[in-house]
Image (cartoon, rainbow, N blue to C red):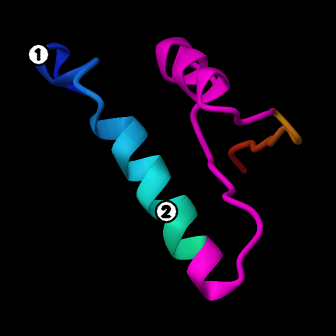
Amino acid sequence: TNENSRSLGVGRCLINYMKNVGNTLGIDKLILDSGCERGRAHKFYYREGFIINRFGFRMSC
């Protein structure tokens, strides 16, 4: 994310929009994938009420 675009409330608006769409469609969960190196994004997700519920692993063949 561009530094100048952070902390403007856009992410919160997007999450709220998706929650409203989900409620309208009868969906009860938002599931988010995020790279493990994105610490600032993770702090934002925690603030917005997301919890970590799984880990992912991969390897090259």
Q: Is residue 22 above or below residue 44?
A: below
- Position in image of residue 48 (x %, y %): 59, 31
Horizontal side, residue 5 vs residue 50: left or right: left
Q: Is residue 38 above or below residue 27?
A: above
Q: Is residue 58 magenta?
A: no
Question: Range of the magenta residues?
Answer: 23-51
- Position in image of residue 19 (x %, y %): 56, 60
Question: Please, which residue is most extreme toward the left here?
Answer: 4
The quarter of the displayed image where residue 51 is located: top right
Q: Earlier in the sequence, mark 1 or mark 2?
A: 1
* Nearest to the observer: residue 11 or residue 58: 11
The residue tagged with tag 2: helix, strand or loop? helix
The tag on residue 18 is 2
Q: Is residue 45 magenta?
A: yes
Q: Residue at x 49, y 23 (%)?
A: 41
Horizontal side, residue 47 vs residue 1: left or right: right
Identify which amino acid the numbered label 2 is placed on.
Answer: Met
Q: Residue at x 58, y 82 (%)?
A: 24
The quarter of the displayed image where residue 22 is located: bottom right
What crowding class fits label 2: few (fewer than 14 Cα within 10 Å), some (14-19), or many (20 or more)? some
Q: Is residue 60 above or below residue 41?
A: below
Q: Residue at x 56, y 13 (%)?
A: 39
The residue tagged with tag 1: helix, strand or loop? helix
Horizontal side, residue 25 vs residue 18: left or right: right
- Position in image of residue 53 (x %, y %): 88, 40
Q: Residue at x 74, y 42 (%)?
A: 59
The CA distance from mark 1 to mark 2 is: 24 Å
Identify which amino acid the numbered label 1 is placed on.
Answer: Asn
Q: Quadrant of the N terminus?
A: top left
The tag on residue 4 is 1
Question: Please, which residue is most extreme toward the bottom here?
Answer: 25
- Position in image of residue 2 (x %, y %): 16, 23
